[in-house]
Amino acid sequence: MALTSPAMLTLRSVSPAVLVLALLAGGPVRAQEDPHLALEGVETPSSLAWVQGENAKTLPVLTGDKRYQGLHDAALKLLAAKDRIAAPSFVGTTVFNFWQDADHVRGVWRRTSLESYRSADPKWETVIDLDALAKAEGKNWIWKGADCRPKTHDRCLVNLSNGGKDAVEVREFDLTTKSFVRDGFVLPESKQTVDWLDADTLILTRDWGAGTTTDSGYGMVVKTLKRAQGLDQAVEVFRGEKADVSARPHVLRDAAGNRVVLIERATDFFHTKTFLLDDAGKATPLPIPERSSIRGMIGGELILTVEEDWSYRFAPNAAPRVFPAGALVAVNPERLLPPKTSDLVISNDCNPCQIFAPGPRQSIDQVAVTDHRVVAVIYDNVRGGLRSFSDRGEWGWDGATLPVIDNAAVSIVATADEGDQLFYSVEGFVTPTQLKLANAFNPKAGADTVKTLPARFDASKLQVEQKEAISKDGTKIPYFLVSQKGAKPDGSAPTLLHAYGGFQLSKLPVYDPLVGKLWLERGGSYAVANIRGGGEFGPAWHEAALKANRQRAYEDYFAVAEDLIATKVTSPRYLGAYGRSNGGLLMGVALTQRPDLWNAVVVESPLLDMIRYTQLPAGASWIGEYGDPAIPAERAWIERYSPYQNLKAGVKYPLAYITTSTKDDRVHPGHARKFAARLGDLGQPYLYYENTDGGHANGADPAANAKRWALHYTYLSRQLMDH
């Protein structure tokens, strides 16, 4: 049975008496009793009027604080600083960068040579001025990247977003003339995945019209589109199912001239059926794990990480090859396809072949493929390293390390389209980011530090520790603490505890100028909890908090908070919580389940109504993470933690700051709106602010981001630093 749509659940469907009784009782809000469904109308007049009213109440409180302007100016100075590291990307052998500052609020896409980029003063050439484009067209364009034509590197598909939404308009751009191609490819706004099939053909998924999108709002029909064709002339090559998350194309090429066209049919957020598309348009399923991620191709072999144990038998009488969850594997896709020779056993054959398998406290965070090497960021107890792997044929793969720093976050920034050059960054909580350039083909040569971010805050009085808390079930939960040297353990340190705990995403020891300048330098402490649900220790760490086990992530977070209190780093009076997106859900649970632990909770871009989340775009895509509230057994354990349904009368909640964006088309703003409105029903104080632009990131340019962070830290200062 189809889930009920928001339009069918109106205030008219519930009697006023029922609503009043529900509010007075302060009991859980059920979908059929929800008095705030109208706030799910993203830009309806009534919703926008409510937003304007809330903003009008909150902004004077926070912007009127004597600290706000100083925090804003400091944030803007950091975000718009011209001595930031210009993050490089490659188009061919040319270095490109997207840059925003006070003079380029929307930003410029620009380029320079590698030699120039390595110099102290690169000579940049502007390719697209987004501020000028937005002004000329009268549009609120936000940059969402570009995908350039392989081999020739002369034309790119530029993605432009209206206000920061995930949905983008795609236009073909000529890098030679620095202009949009007359009569070139133009794809109207949609959530879409597009790739170059050849110089004059695209393969893509998008909203093609009725019946072509999934319940999650993503494309499920893959088509090819030739130059000069209209969308109505595109040729369908694959069709998924409405209950899928999406179906999307993935074109891979390697230095040897191989090309593989894959169709990835995501049946949920973590399970994908992969198909090999041949030149005739036939899609054949590949027998690789549904829980795996394809990272690239080298020498005709796909490079993938497997997120579940995989046992593969090349032939019936061959010994199975077993690859543990989290392993990095190389496999030739053609060799996986039928027919197989039933009596064939190849003793020294390495297909599939294990490249690297992490240990129990390790994980693979990133993988990149150059012309001749596979490069992987590997974390050991949440400390980063970097290895370059080479294929030794029948002897398997061999790895060599590239230089990093101790106790660091490591990130692959860019790999060359041609050759083996690699940009990567290393940083720590109090160690400014270094950008390094290495040749992955020759890791023994080391790496050159080509850029170093100037120190953005005074770290001389700070110390960094990695500690452990014990969760309710006895599991050891690591966390980092950045605190003031010599601080007395008397429970008085204003402390901000951050976590995410979902989707196998790790929280790493990164250098954050905003946290440093706006919080640490002003006397605050900062803790980052590596709770279950994340990817810090591989797939098993994530799976431990999936679906029915979601409460474990919350108990991990509470355990870290309790450890900070027990060791007298801080106390509930001075402890604050911050999380965004899935971390915003964590904040809602922190507020409703343990209001005694905090005096401040920043709930940003959150999921909060977990009973209706699948009915709000793009909620259905996350059923693999949270479960399906349409299934009674799953609804039962979702109801136990869903923050919106668990706000109750008679409970003293700390003053929460709830914030989102009208243009967020990933996590619906209705979650935040309804949660705030429900707090109001219960007579509880709260602060609510909604940015009318910004998308899911809730800040599309330096000015908007400066305001965003100044509001955050003004609120935190009021709650945790004032006596």
Image: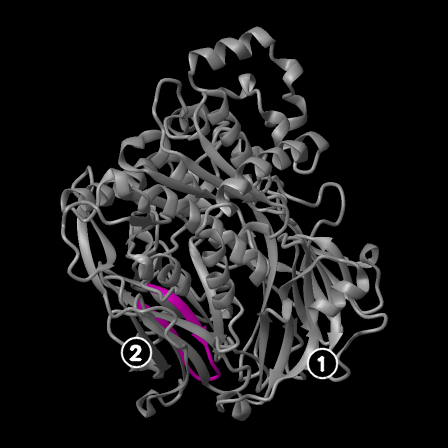
According to the image, label 1 marks what residue? 175
Question: Which residue: 32% across, 64% down?
Answer: 318
Q: Earlier in the sequence, mark 1 or mark 2?
A: 1
- Measured as percent of width and height from the top left, residue 562 is found at 20, 41
Question: Which residue: 67% across, 35% down?
Answer: 48
Does the rendering let one see residue 586?
no
- Cα–Cα span, label 1 and label 2: 35 Å
Query: In the image, which residues are magenta?
Result: 364-378
Question: Which residue: 47% across, 53% down?
Answer: 710
- Measured as percent of width and height from the top left, residue 355 is found at 33, 72
Position of residue 203 relative to residue 98, above or below, is above
Magenta-drawn stretch, dominant element (helix, strand or loop): strand
Q: Is residue 494 left or right of residue 178?
A: left
Q: Report the front residue among 264 and 91.
A: 91
Number of numbered discs present?
2
Q: Amino acid at mark 2?
A: Val
Q: Secondary structure at mark 1?
A: loop
Point out the image quarter for the C terminus. Answer: top left
Badge 1, how many Cα within 10 Å: few under 14, some, many 20+?
Answer: some
According to the image, label 2 marks what residue? 404
Question: Which residue: 38% across, 46% down?
Answer: 716
Residue 138 lies within the magenta run: no
